């Protein structure tokens, strides 16, 4: 057995010993005596009697010292904001970032925010977004970041579910050369929401000045300038750190809860072991703080480890060119880059020979990690060829919070198998099962499940809905967490993820609910019935396709209807959905019980072979659908 196999085996046979050792890298106000509580509900819990503060572990201990710190680094760069869309680069040392966060936390405390309160953060990729997350953690408050691309309807749903004391926002975001005002979106969301936060704090950016509502809204700069810094609040290890909403198979998002203690332990362990990064290294996750990658690997994991983290406000191409990523690596001596395969597909499309790469020194880069969607072998092999470093596909989810399957380069760099996400990471017992929950043979496709006990960092429940947590994840195959993804494990133990087994689609690494889109489409007066499915896309992995049955007697122009539906989804869900194609059909294929055959429709749209479902009510409809989808878009 190699080093990876040895560590993985020990993590499963002795999880208390394995994770008890990992926990010593974290500073505890009260060290836990219980590592794993196997009988806790609704599932096992970690470090139940420990107390700590995540912000202290991310910032203060690197300034003032603390357990698990070999060397303080107050003057090392902690956060670098690289923004080609505003043509600025700013950085904060650990001391400077600690002081900024402490003052922002004081400002929030002055608005009544305390331990256990929730704060919604609706912001673009600005450093204040990361500071806001850390300031909430400092107070023991629970932050819920909502991606800035979401429309008012989606934001309102999250505000009503999280019920924040305060909403933090900004006057605008910037997409390429386009300034996107955020305040009108926030105002519209608050008009729709039933819950009313006590205050909204708005960061005024130079590109756009927002109108503030007297009595409710506060100017960010003025509020912070008048505030006094506060110290960290000690919280229980199982107290929530944040709630992050992820799409479910219905239109109602699921609030994934992350606790403080196990989250800190898992992320701190993952940096040197999975990503090969330690204190002083420069780590760049080219994602957004609105997604789990931004939470785990822009903000928390790098800072918990004493790294320098890059927060990038731009695109892989177009801001200003396809050398954007190479420029950041060169300018900041990035050691590890983590992004979505979509980004590299876009770079390859613009610069297939990678001629722009020659203009930049990327010699500090040791590894490229890809995740968020399945990495096709062509993209992986191209990136590896042009960069000359190992390219590591890996797989995890919003719910898991950190990698489940990977090539753990800090433990042992194993052979890369294009098309596979790698080997199960220590802590994760990955299985592939059939519909009855039985393990399938090597190479056979089935449902990916994770056997309990689940390791630290995994969601403990869903916000305010333990029953939905149990129903969604733990009921289908008792003793196992159902990931919702399908795939197989080969004879060497490598795991390949082949796609979703539910109706959530993955658009450029963003998990979006087709159910939410269907609600919008179905609201049109001319639409009698509809289905939204994810179809394969060379650039984004998947894009939504709307299939629409018209109401009887509807007299509409197909192109005009399509344009109206596209505009409606953009307004209610956001441009992030990339909903652009609508096909009018006479009827949708269904089972005799009335269930729409979405998986079969996806196969037809992607040109894949499919077995004729035995429960279909009218097989001829599949041929009709194939002809309609084959027509030019």
Image (spheres, rainbow, N blue to C red):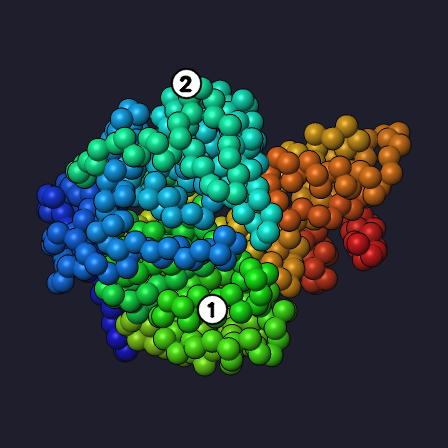
Q: Position of residue 225 (x, y in %)?
A: 29, 34
Callout 1 secondary element: helix
Q: Say which quarter of the image contains residue 4.
A: bottom left
Q: Is residue 283 above or below residue 502?
A: below
Q: Is residue 235 above or below residue 374?
A: above
Residue annotated with mark 2: 215
Q: Residue furthest top?
A: 215
Q: Position of residue 628 (x, y in %)?
A: 82, 52
State the residue in front, 299 or 30: 299
Q: Position of residue 23 (x, y in %)?
A: 18, 54
Q: Is residue 618 in view?
A: no
Number of other residues with Cα within 10 Å of mark 2, as a class: few under 14, some 14 to 19, many 20 or more: few
Q: Is residue 325 in view?
A: yes
- Looking at the image, residue 91 sits to the left or right of residue 341; the answer is left
Q: Position of residue 540 (x, y in %)?
A: 60, 58
Q: Which disc, if any, is residue 428?
A: none
State the residue in front, 106 or 587: 106
- Looking at the image, residue 565 sits to the left or right of residue 411; the answer is right
Q: Is residue 484 above or below residue 564?
A: below
State the residue in front, 586 or 193: 193
Count of number-bearing discs: 2
Callout 2 secondary element: loop
- Residue drawn at x 27%, y 49% is 97
Q: Say which quarter of the image contains residue 461.
A: top left
Residue annotated with mark 1: 327
Q: Say which quarter of the image contains residue 368.
A: bottom left
């Amino acid at each position: 057995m190699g080093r990876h196999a040895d560590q993985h085996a020990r993590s499963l046979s002795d999880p208390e010993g394995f994770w008890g050792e990992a926990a010593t890298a974290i500073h505890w106000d009260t060290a836990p005596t219980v590592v794993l509580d196997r009988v806790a509900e609704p599932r096992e819990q970690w470090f139940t009697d420990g107390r700590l503060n995540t912000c202290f572990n991310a910032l203060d201990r690197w300034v003032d010292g603390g357990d698990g710190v070999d060397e303080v680094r107050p003057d090392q760069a902690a956060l670098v904001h690289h923004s080609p869309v505003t043509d600025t680069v700013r950085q904060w040392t650990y001391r400077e970032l600690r002081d900024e966060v402490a003052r922002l936390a004081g400002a929030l405390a002055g608005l009544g925010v305390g331990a256990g309160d929730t704060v919604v953060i609706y912001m673009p990729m600005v450093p204040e977004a990361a500071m806001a997350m850390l300031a909430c953690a400092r107070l023991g408050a629970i932050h819920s970041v909502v991606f800035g691309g979401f429309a008012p309807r989606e934001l309102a749903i999250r505000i009503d579910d999280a019920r924040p004391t305060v909403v933090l926002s900004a006057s605008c975001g910037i997409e390429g050369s386009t300034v996107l005002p955020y305040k009108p979106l926030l105002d519209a969301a608050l008009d729709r929401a039933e819950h009313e936060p006590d205050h909204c704090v708005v960061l005024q950016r130079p590109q756009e000045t927002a109108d503030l509502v007297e009595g409710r809204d506060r100017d960010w700069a003025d509020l912070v300038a008048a505030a006094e810094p506060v110290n960290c609040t000690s919280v229980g290890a199982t107290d929530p750190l944040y709630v992050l909403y992820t799409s479910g198979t219905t239109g109602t998002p699921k609030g994934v809860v992350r606790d403080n203690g196990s989250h800190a332990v898992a992320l701190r362990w993952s940096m040197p072991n999975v990503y090969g990064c330690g204190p002083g290294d420069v780590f760049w996750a080219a994602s957004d703080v609105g997604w789990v990658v931004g939470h785990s690997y822009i903000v928390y994991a790098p800072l918990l480890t004493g790294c320098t983290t890059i927060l990038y406000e731009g695109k892989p191409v177009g801001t200003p060119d396809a050398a954007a990523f190479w420029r950041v690596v060169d300018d900041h001596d990035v050691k590890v880059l983590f992004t979505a395969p979509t980004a590299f597909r876009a770079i390859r499309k613009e610069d297939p020979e990678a001629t722009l790469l020659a203009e930049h020194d990327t010699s500090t880069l040791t590894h490229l990690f890809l995740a968020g969607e399945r990495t096709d072998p062509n993209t992986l092999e191209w990136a590896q060829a042009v960069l000359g470093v190992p390219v590591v596909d890996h797989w995890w989810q919003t719910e898991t919070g950190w990698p489940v399957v990977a090539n753990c380069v800090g433990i042992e760099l194993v052979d890369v198998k294009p098309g596979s996400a790698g080997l199960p990471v220590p802590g994760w017992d990955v299985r592939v099962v059939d519909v009855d929950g039985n393990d399938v043979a090597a190479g056979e496709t089935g449902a990916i499940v994770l056997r309990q006990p689940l390791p630290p960092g995994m969601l403990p429940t869903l916000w305010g809905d333990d029953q939905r947590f149990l129903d969604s994840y733990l009921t289908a195959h008792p003793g196992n967490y159902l990931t919702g993804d399908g795939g197989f494990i080969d004879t060497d133990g490598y795991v390949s993820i082949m796609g979703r087994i539910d109706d959530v689609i993955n658009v450029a690494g963003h998990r979006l609910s087709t159910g939410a889109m269907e609600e919008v489409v179905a609201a049109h007066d001319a639409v009698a019935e509809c289905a939204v499915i994810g179809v394969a896309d060379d650039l984004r992995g998947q894009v939504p396709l709307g299939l629409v049955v018209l109401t009887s007697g509807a007299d509409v122009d197909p192109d005009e209807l399509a344009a109206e539906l596209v505009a409606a989804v953009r307004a209610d869900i956001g441009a992030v959905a990339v909903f652009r194609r609508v096909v009018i059909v006479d009827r949708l294929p269904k089972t005799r019980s009335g269930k729409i055959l979405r998986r079969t429709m996806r196969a037809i749209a992607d040109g894949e072979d499919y077995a004729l479902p035995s429960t279909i009510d009218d097989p001829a409809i599949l041929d009709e659908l194939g002809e309609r989808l084959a027509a030019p878009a």
